Amino acid sequence: MLPPPPRQPPPPARTARGGSVRLQRAFLRGPLGVLRLLQLLAGAAFWITIATSKYQGAVHFALFVSVLFWLLTLSIYFVTLLGQQELVPVLGSRWLVVNVAHDLLAAALYGAATGIMIDQTQRHSYCNLKSYPLPCAYHAFLAAAVCGGLCLGLYLLSALYGCCRRYQGKQEVV
């Protein structure tokens, strides 16, 4: 009786277009990968801070902006990390331009959201006294305004980085 043939390792995972899924370590360690992680952390802090406070009116728009761009940034981060830009219909061939457009739009809307949070902080400044007995959203709005400003700066930095890469003639994010 002959021994069974040796087992061969399974072939690498294939995508719909035949390319293999590989972790883009250069993106993970590069400036844009680090900026994306910081955007995700600051964005999560922004919307969690708002969502855990009592909010009303224009703060709904700030919450919408923060959750929308947190989800978009998360998807862009993982698509780029896995190197699957070509699977995004129409936009995959222009991934660097898509990233810059995303960052500029996020910066503009985070600017508006930060302005809303600064306004809400000023409107609730009356309850920033130690002897004020009722619950107040002042500290939550102040923290959200700081996180929103941080998000604004991070998105502007990544847009500037993408513009510099485009100006240098590069077509790829990594």
Image (tube, rainbow, N blue to C red):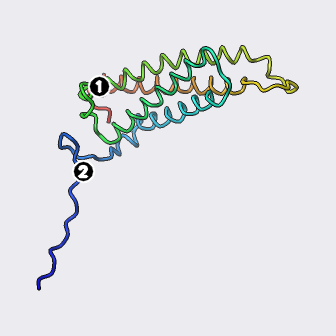
Q: Is residue 68 above or below residue 109?
A: below
Determine the secondary structure under disc 1: loop
Packing grade of label 2 (10 A; few <14, some 14-19, many >=20) is few
- 1 vs 2, front mark: 2
For the point 39% across and 34% down, the residue is 75
Q: Which one is nearer the viewer's eye here, 59 or 155?
A: 59
For the point 46% across and 22% down, the residue is 156
Q: Which dot marks residue 58? A: none
Name the quadrant containing residue 42. top right
Residue 98 locus on image (x, y percent): 33, 24
Q: Is residue 30 above or below residue 88?
A: below
Image quadrant holding the N terminus, namely bottom left
Image quadrant holding the C terminus, namely top left
Residue tagged 1: 168
Q: Hey, what amino acid is under mark 2?
A: Ala
For the point 49% across and 32% down, the residue is 39
Q: Hey, what amino acid is under mark 1?
A: Gln
Image position of 141 (left or right of 92): right
Q: Which dot marks residue 13? A: 2
Looking at the image, is mark 1 or mark 2 earlier in the sequence? 2
For the point 15% across and 81% down, the residue is 3
